[in-house]
Image (cartoon, rainbow, N blue to C red):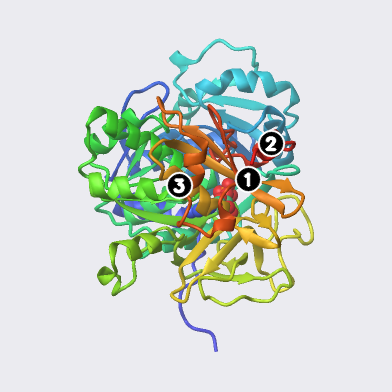
Amino acid sequence: MRGKMMTTPLTITEIMRFADRHHGRTEVVSITADQPLHRCTFNDVFRRARQLANALSRLGIAPGERVASLAWNDYRHLELYYGVACAGRVLHTVNPRLFAEQLVYIINHAEDRVLFFDVAFLPLVEALADKLSTVDAYVILTPADKLPGSSLSALQSYESLLEAETDEYQWPVLDENDANLLCYTSGTTGNPKGVLYSHRSTVLHAYASCMPDAMRLSQQDTVLPVVPMFHVNAWGTPYACAMIGAKMVLPGPKMADGETLQRLIEQEEVTIALGVPTVWLALLAYLRDSGKTVPSLERTVVGGAACPPSVMEEFEQKHGVRTHHAWGMTEMSPLGTVNSPLRGMESLSAAEKDAVRLKQGRGIFGVDMKIVGDDGEELPWDGEAFGNLKVKGWWVCDGYFGEDGNSGAHDEDGWFATGDVATIDPLGFMQITDRTKDVIKSGGEWISSIELENLAVAHPDVAEAAVIGISHEKWTERPLLIVVPEEGTSPDKAELVAWFKGKVADWWIPDDVVLVDELPHTATGKISKVMLRKQFADYSSQS
Ligand code: AMP
């Protein structure tokens, strides 16, 4: 027997409609290329989203067609999130940090019809335009009087595009499984792959991310997403904040600028900020140097890469900010786990609490996870067994855009192989030990590069560190520690190696250390182990 309940489709149009009526006056504060600080409300964003939807019809973009954005976090990008997707088109958020060939590949692969971009990316777009075979309109996210001269013929200003339209628009009734947003993974090998989110997956992800043991979002919060809107939709905050009515603070092009972040946090009374560890290293360094503080900030959510314990400690001890480790990926919208303490954990010793905090967290209802061995058999949740981490759930992709058949990452039961290696403890806390490709295999046993990196950055003279496996005749691979020293220091290699003694098993300790000025990073701000492995391919240990 079927239940007799309403079956309104789960679409982000419903999030927008609700926020427009119930949280309309909630503020959205942005830094943009043309404005040092812009204030508007959700009402304004959705009014302009209706104008944008009319403009898309005028530009001849058919339902289901892709509209690209190449932009930082600000209110205009937020308008694209809703205006494009609620009008039944698909927003393709493009990561400007990708290499030129990758940008051309993904824009052509997505068959984007129009490209909306920040003025700072004009030289990049001009250089690529000849190779973009499907784009026939270019829109700069700026007013007409700030439109720069350009070699692009079909160039127009976003503000004049909107001004020409009425703010009356009848949003179409969409199927909840229709696509709303497309985001390509940076892909360490081969071409990037497109993850195509649906309205339904996005709504369910937004619900889950607000839950108390996930991001605990409320209308009382002021949220600073320092995660880009071009990378996994800023971890879903544009939807979660509208759903819950939380104020948004969007830092525009000033994402990794400690001074701007501190100012925004203080001035706008930010309560929760989200970002990758690199961003927090920049903020904490600025706070240290300037003596400034972040009094309103209650918590940070850190993910995208393992958060060094030193970052958590400094946030908590110096600034009273709690750090929640979170884990996920583009294919997962992105949330998989969040680290929130369990009941009874208050009585743990400081060292025990630290050990738990380092883990990537527990599952959120909506995504299930398991670890399996190389034979595919599930491994126990004992906190010891390392295995390939697989997930299944409502906001996990079941394939890639434009690809038919099995992705290779999905098994016959539908579980998706994340490419991460992890342990899960008896309380359900998952800990990432490596990417499958980054794991170091020494004498047939696995060494966690993340654990060694975490220990290395806790050394006072180490600013950033990476550990890779280098080939070794006897052991197959041995760990090599690559270190960027803190400014003004030149740590002694033997002393760095000795630092690990007693902290990990002796056979895990790196045999050698290399000091470098900087480490290579990927388009999403993570240390590029692929580049490092290439760079040190012929390295032979000094010891
Ligand atoms: P992306 O799809 O670019 O967001 O990258 C996802 C990958 O980032 C995951 O598969 C992990 O390897 C890594 N990652 C994300 N969050 C964490 C975390 N908290 N700790 C360690 N690695 C993480």
The disc placed on residue 536 is 2
**Residue 191 occupies quadrant:** top right
Judging depth in this view, the residue of 14 and 450 nearest the camera is 450
If you read the primary sequence from the N terminus, does the residue marked by circle 3 or circle 2 appear first?
3
Judging depth in this view, the residue of 266 and 165 nearest the camera is 266
User: Residue shown at 54%/29% (left/top)?
Assistant: 518
Asked if the beta carbon under badge 2 is closer than 8 A to the nearest atom of ligand 1, the reply is no
If you read the primary sequence from the N terminus, does the residue marked by circle 2 or circle 1 appear first?
1
- The reply to whether residue 233 is in sight is yes
Which residue carries the number 3 mark?
Answer: 499
| x then y, percent, for residue 342 | 34, 71
Q: Amino acid at mark 3?
A: Trp
| x then y, percent, for residue 87 | 54, 46
Q: Is residue 360 left or right of residue 407?
A: left
User: Residue shown at 26%/50% (left/top)?
Assistant: 298
Q: Amino acid at mark 2?
A: Phe
Report the Cα–Cα distance between label 3 and label 2.
23 Å
Element type at marker 2? loop
Which residue carries the number 1 mark?
Answer: 468
Work out whether 490 lies above or below 445: above
Report the Cα–Cα distance between label 3 and label 1.
18 Å
Extreme-right residue of the structure:
405
Q: Quadrant of the N terminus?
A: bottom right
**Residue 411 occupies quadrant:** bottom right
User: Residue shown at 42%/55% (left/top)?
Assistant: 325
Judging depth in this view, the residue of 330 and 122 nearest the camera is 330
- The reply to whether residue 397 is in sight is no
Element type at marker 1? strand
Q: Is residue 270 left or right of residue 200?
A: left
